Image (cartoon, rainbow, N blue to C red):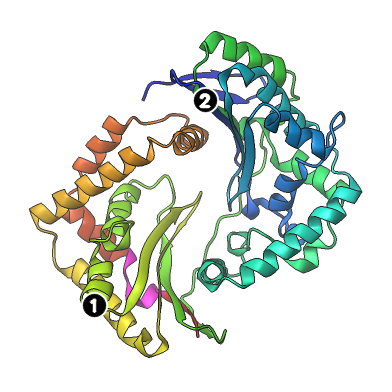
Amino acid sequence: MNYKTYTLNNGLRLIHRQTEKQVVHCGIIINTGTRDEFENEHGLAHFHEHLVFKGTHKRKAYHIISRMEDVGGEIDAYTTKEETCIYASFLNRYYDRTMELMNDIIFHSVYPEKEIIREREVILDEINSYKDSPAELIFDDFEELVFDGHSLGRNILGAKKTLKKFNTSQLHDFFTRTYNTDQIVFCSVGNIDFDKLVKYFEKYFGEIYANKRSWKRKPFKNYKPVEKTIVKKTHQSHCIIGTTAYNFRNKKRLPFLLLTNLLAGSGLNTRLNLSLREKNGLVYYIESSYTPYYDTGIFNIYFGCDNDKLNKSINIIKKELTKIKEEPLGIKQLQRAKQQMIGQIAISLENPEILLLNLGKSYLLYNKVDSLEVVTQRIELITTDDILAVANEIFNEQKFSTLIYK
């Protein structure tokens, strides 16, 4: 992948990929998320992401929104367990405008108390709305089970108890402690001369005070499998089965990602979709997912079904997991799985926003970005023995946790 990089004296990094399109996509990714909150700060990372749009020393909330929308641009943000991202799309002649705005809202927010009160109600409504969607809520409840007692298990939206106590001082303290300059990447995909982009970068981010990270994340240890059923009185049963998995630096991550995709990825020809939906008509939707974190990871299989089909569905899943641990993939099966995954990655990178976020996150974590050709080569090197090894290591039934809504 062709890209150029630049690092400021304060540690802030820039990565850019040149395109010839009129529309530009850029963003700032910060290596800070929910797991970096103190116990009394549950939900503060997400709350902070909301509040940066609510006022700076020179702009009120309306002026922040209008700054991009007045020129047809868009700006948005999200928070995860380990990162916060603010990103924008706009016509390429507004690079200067956008970078100035991002500097202002991230590094010069004032977190007005009246906006805190207003936004608190917005997020409380968001939490209530989330609770009405069991197919989404169950993922957060499952991570709370798996990462019991650790900050990785916290719901990103936060808890009503802590949200009601957040104030301007806490937001300032959180920003100072966690928005470290050596943990921030500005990423760009667009049509601009790189030297010109570097000048903008120096202009708006070069004078930011160096605040490099001196603390380390508390690692997750002592996972204990749990089985739990919660009565929700939903029309269907919702179920997640899963366990801990590899962290983002583990070399087994890619073979396991291939296995996860083969098992119940986005394709309709996956093993679990064929066995549960196509052959037996037990579920409408089933998926498997794997998320690597700094020091650990999480794997899960989710499905929803009628209450009387729950046990049969779980038994079929367990049989498929046993089969994949005991029966090596045939050469054609493995090659088909590889081609499918390579194609999915290639297609996803055609989406400019996905490309942007992949560019930024990879540079943030690994200080490099592998090209599709390099990723393809690594996938092609995966063997049947690699798949068997990760399957037997992760798919240990004694280590699985289960959460059911009924």
Q: How far across and down, in percent of the image, does residue 300 sit?
A: 41, 66
Q: Which residue is mark 1?
A: 319
Q: How far across and down, in percent of the image, does residue 254 sit?
A: 32, 47
Up-down: is 217 above or below 181?
A: below
Q: Nearer the viewer, residue 351 or 201?
A: 351
Q: Nearer the viewer, residue 135 or 63?
A: 63
Up-down: is 54 above or below 94?
A: below
Q: Which residue is mark 2?
A: 23
Give left or right: position of 71 versus 238.
Answer: right
Residue type indicated by callout 2: Val
Number of other residues with Cα within 10 Å of mark 2, as a class: few under 14, some 14 to 19, many 20 or more: some
- Asked if residue 309 shows in the view, the reply is yes
Mark 2 or 1, which is nearer the eye? 2
User: What secondary structure is found at the residue carrying circle 2?
Assistant: strand
Q: Earlier in the sequence, mark 2 or mark 1?
A: 2
* Magenta-drawn segment: 394-400
Query: Which residue lies at the image location 80% right of the left edge and 33% below the top edge?
Result: 63
Q: Nearer the viewer, residue 63 or 134?
A: 63
Q: How far across and down, in percent of the image, does residue 383 sit?
A: 17, 49
Give left or right: position of 225 versus 88.
Answer: left
Query: Is residue 290 a member of the stretch shown in magenta?
Result: no
Quarter-of-image position of residue 245: bottom left
The residue furthest left is 331
Quarter-of-image position of residue 106: top right
User: What secondary structure is found at the residue carrying circle 1?
Assistant: helix
Q: Are marks 2 and 1 in contact (CB under 8 Å)?
A: no
Query: Is residue 396 a member of the stretch shown in magenta?
Result: yes
- Asked if residue 210 shows in the view, the reply is no
